[in-house]
Image (spheres, rainbow, N blue to C red):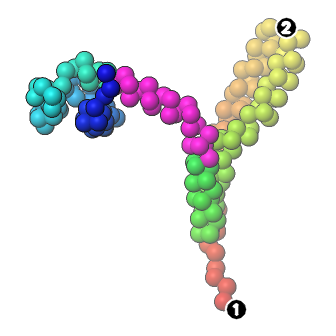
Amino acid sequence: MATRRSDEHTRILRQSIVSSARLRGLSISDIYALFAKESIINPRTNEPWSMATIQNDLRELENQWKEEAMKNTADHRARVLAEIKEAKASAWKTGKLSLVLRAIQQEVDLLGLNELERMGVEIALANLLKGLPPEIADNLRAALSKRVAERKNLARSGKVIELNRASVNG
């Protein structure tokens, strides 16, 4: 049996409300109560929508969200990269180097530019440690981990000099 247009329209509107409510953290029973409070009813029966209908809507919506996320990851990444580049350009124009550096770091993270270098270092280190006695290798790993953590903390606390660009009248 084909779905009537009015039924499809009703389903879309109901799922829109269910989606919005779920994304605001409401449970199935909270959504059911919201429907009752707002008199959102099944127009065919003039009865409240059942919790099973709400649960089915949520299941369908969550599957749609997962498919959308998987399908458009490249699109999302491209859009975010364009936004980061725009923010970086604006930061350059205003002379806010701390924002420029943050944007660059976000680009590096988004594109995974440090991953290959890090993986190469980890492979070389693993090969080096493989030939050592286990207690020495464990001590070296601990020392290196501590040193890396110290460097990360130092980098986070470093001060950035803000540049104020003077306008040039010519």
Q: Is residue 162 above or below residue 158?
A: below
Residue 42, quarter of picture: top left
Image x and y of residue 50, in percent: 19, 21
As drawn, is 2 to the left or to the right of 126? left
Query: At 62% from the left edge and 40% from the top edge, which residue is drawn?
Result: 74
Task: Please tell me whether mark 2 sits on a helix, a strand or a loop.
Answer: loop
As drawn, is 21 to the left or to the right of 108? left
Q: Is residue 66 magenta?
A: yes
Q: Is residue 40 above or below residue 53?
A: below
Q: Which residues are magenta?
A: 58-78
As drawn, is 134 to the left or to the right of 3? right
Query: At 63% from the left edge and 56% from the top edge, which residue is drawn?
Result: 85
Which residue is denoted by mark 1 in the rendering? Answer: 170
Query: At 76% from the left edge and 16% from the top edge, which residue is drawn?
Result: 139
Q: In which quadrant will I find the N terminus?
A: top left
Image x and y of residue 38, in percent: 13, 37
